[in-house]
Image (tube, rainbow, N blue to C red):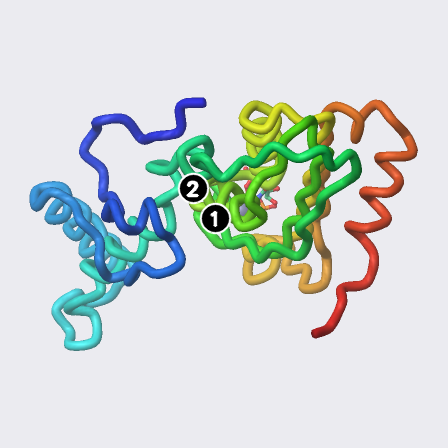
Amino acid sequence: MSTTRGSKNVIRPTMAARGSMATVDPDDMETDNATQVEFEGLIRRQLELLGEDPERDGLLKTPSRVAKSMAWLTRGYDLDARQVIGDAMFAENHENMVMVRDIEMYSMCEHHMLPFFGKVHVAYIPNGKIVGLSKLPRVVEVFARRLQVQERLGEQIANALDEVLQPKGVGVVIEAVHLCMMMRGVEKQSSRTITSSLRGLFRDDSKTRSEFLRLAHGPSASY
Ligand SMILES: Nc1nc2c(ncn2[C@@H]2O[C@H](COP(=O)(O)OP(=O)(O)OP(=O)(O)O)[C@@H](O)[C@H]2O)c(=O)[nH]1
Ligand SMILES: [Zn+2]
């Protein structure tokens, strides 16, 4: 389950941003100076090609802001699902479905590098061990924070949970809107894309599949 960008020169998030995603300052990005300078140069050139003046006051810090922002938005390349789950797996004989639904997700489509975002519903049936609930949204982050397509995002989440938890089944449903279909191109404002990735009993057992899809698509609770 190799998930890193490798050793190439890339703008990268800090160790803190990789390990503890909830608390890190998005501006707190580490990178080697040469990579940062090169990236900022590209953004400055992009501004010029857009007919802008990169020296005007409002744009002076934009290349550096964009570099930090992109490092943050793609930090999933430096994360690994197995590491994120760590040892938060506990022996437990729970034989029914466990589901965390309505997990907020922000990603970027690899075709236009525009955001797509929405909700992810993740469920599994344990096989002798359960996982810390917070780890399911963390695994979503590992794969969402990259250049993606929605279908692959769901498959990668399902594969990672299947591999690490070895459960009786896994189900992942993603409901998302794509800005590349809203603010440009076909300009459809209310269409949503729904994908599902099913493994084990979720794929092979119709009752399990129905229960999962009913729970995933049912109304959200309001607390
Ligand atoms: N399957 C899939 N397609 C996506 C996703 N995100 C964006 N796309 C699509 O990628 C396709 C790229 O098509 P192209 O014809 O190469 O690009 P384009 O001319 O910009 O396409 P339009 O968006 O139709 O203007 C578009 O149909 C997008 O809607 C995704 O997550 N999954
Ligand atoms: Zn797109």
Who is closer to the viewer here, 93 or 55? Answer: 93
Front disc: 2 or 1:
2
Query: Where residue 108 sits: x, y (%)?
Result: 47, 48
Q: In this view, does 156 lie to the left or right of 33?
A: right
Quarter of the image for the N terminus: give it: top left
Q: Name the residue under label 1.
A: 108
Residue occupying image coordinates x 66% and y 50%: 100
Q: How crowded is mark 2: few (under 14 residues within 10 Å), some or many (20 or more)?
A: many
Q: Is mark 1 on a helix, strand or loop?
A: strand
Q: Mark 2 points at which residue?
A: 146
Residue occupying image coordinates x 63% and y 31%: 129
Q: Is mark 2 on a helix, strand or loop?
A: loop
Ligand 1's quadrant: top right
The amino acid type, in three-letter code, at marker 2 is Arg
Quadrant of the image occupied by residue 210: top right
Q: Is residue 61 left or right of residue 18?
A: left
Who is closer to the viewer here, 154 or 220? Answer: 220
